[in-house]
Image (spheres, rainbow, N blue to C red):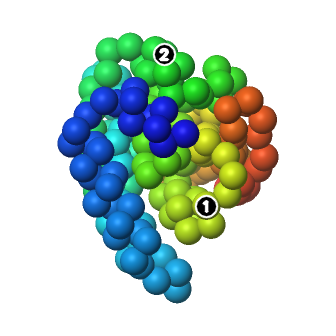
């Protein structure tokens, strides 16, 4: 999966950052998850006209991630090239280490993914559920699931986030 992402991105800068952050992650202690994930580099592809994407980027930065935002005019092509099944798509797409993060996935779930390293291509929150990071509206939140997905499009619930009244 990592080679596919690197080939698609084709960026020497990304390769250098991935190598650097991978070394940091390998050296970090399993007990200190904040240190391990805070040094990782997240590339976010977003439509220039989408406001919630910027809010999600802020959420990730506020939770210790280094983020590079890339404005993308053809998000469907980017999602297809990264292997995100249409039924799992949302507005923005991110790449971190050897995983793809689709949509409004909370930072805590990304940190857990990076610490546990389950088999799969990434995490997705399909659509744009109210109350997910970047889609906040007061204290209200719809119930939603963060899904672990693979190249075949198979999914498993990685984390359930319950609704609030």
Identify the residue shown where x is 26% and y is 34%: 11
Considering only vertical position in the picture, is 51 above or below 60? above
Considering only vertical position in the picture, is 36 above or below 113? below
Identify the residue shown where x is 67% and y is 57%: 118
Disc 2: CA contacts within 10 A as few (<14), some (14-19) or many (>=20): some
Q: Quadrant of the N terminus?
A: top right
4 lies left or right of 158: left
106 lies left or right of 150: left
154 lies left or right of 75: right
Alpha carbon of mark 1 to alpha carbon of mark 2: how far?
Answer: 27 Å
* Secondary structure found at label 1: loop
Q: Which residue is mark 2?
A: 76
Whole-percent x and y of residue 9? 34, 30
Q: In the drawing, what numbered circle is on residue 117?
A: 1
Identify the residue shown where x is 28% and y is 43%: 14
Q: Nearer the viewer, residue 11 or 145?
A: 11
Whole-percent x and y of residue 26? 43, 71
> Splitting the image into 4 quarters, where does residue 7 fall?
top left
Q: In the drawing, what numbered circle is on residue 74?
A: none
Disc 1: CA contacts within 10 A as few (<14), some (14-19) or many (>=20): few
| First in residue order: circle 1 vs circle 2 | 2
Tell me if I can see residue 148 in this picture: yes
Considering only vertical position in the picture, is 143 above or below 30? above
* Secondary structure found at label 2: helix
Question: Which numbered disc, 1 or 2, marks the residue closer to the eye?
Answer: 1
Identify the residue shown where x is 33% and y is 61%: 21
Q: Nearer the viewer, residue 30 or 110?
A: 30
> Splitting the image into 4 quarters, where does residue 155 fall?
top right
Q: Nearer the viewer, residue 18 or 75?
A: 18
Whole-percent x and y of residue 100? 52, 41
Tell me if I can see residue 101 in this picture: no
> Splitting the image into 4 quarters, where does residue 20 fall?
bottom left
């Amino acid at each position: 999966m990592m080679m596919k992402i690197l080939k698609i991105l084709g960026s020497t800068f990304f390769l250098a950052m991935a190598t650097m952050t991978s070394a940091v992650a390998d050296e970090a202690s399993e007990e200190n998850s904040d240190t391990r994930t805070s040094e990782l580099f997240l590339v976010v592809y977003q439509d220039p006209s989408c406001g919630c994407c910027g809010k999600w980027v802020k959420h990730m930065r506020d939770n210790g991630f280094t983020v590079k935002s890339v404005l993308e005019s053809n998000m469907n092509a980017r999602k297809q090239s990264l292997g995100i099944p249409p039924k799992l798509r949302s507005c923005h797409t991110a790449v971190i280490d050897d995983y793809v993060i689709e949509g409004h996935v909370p930072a805590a779930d990304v940190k857990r993914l990076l610490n546990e390293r389950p088999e799969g291509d990434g995490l997705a929150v399909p659509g744009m559920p109210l109350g997910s990071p970047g889609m906040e509206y007061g204290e209200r939140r719809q119930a939603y699931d963060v899904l672990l997905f693979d190249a075949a499009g198979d999914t498993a619930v990685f984390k359930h986030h319950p609704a609030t009244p």
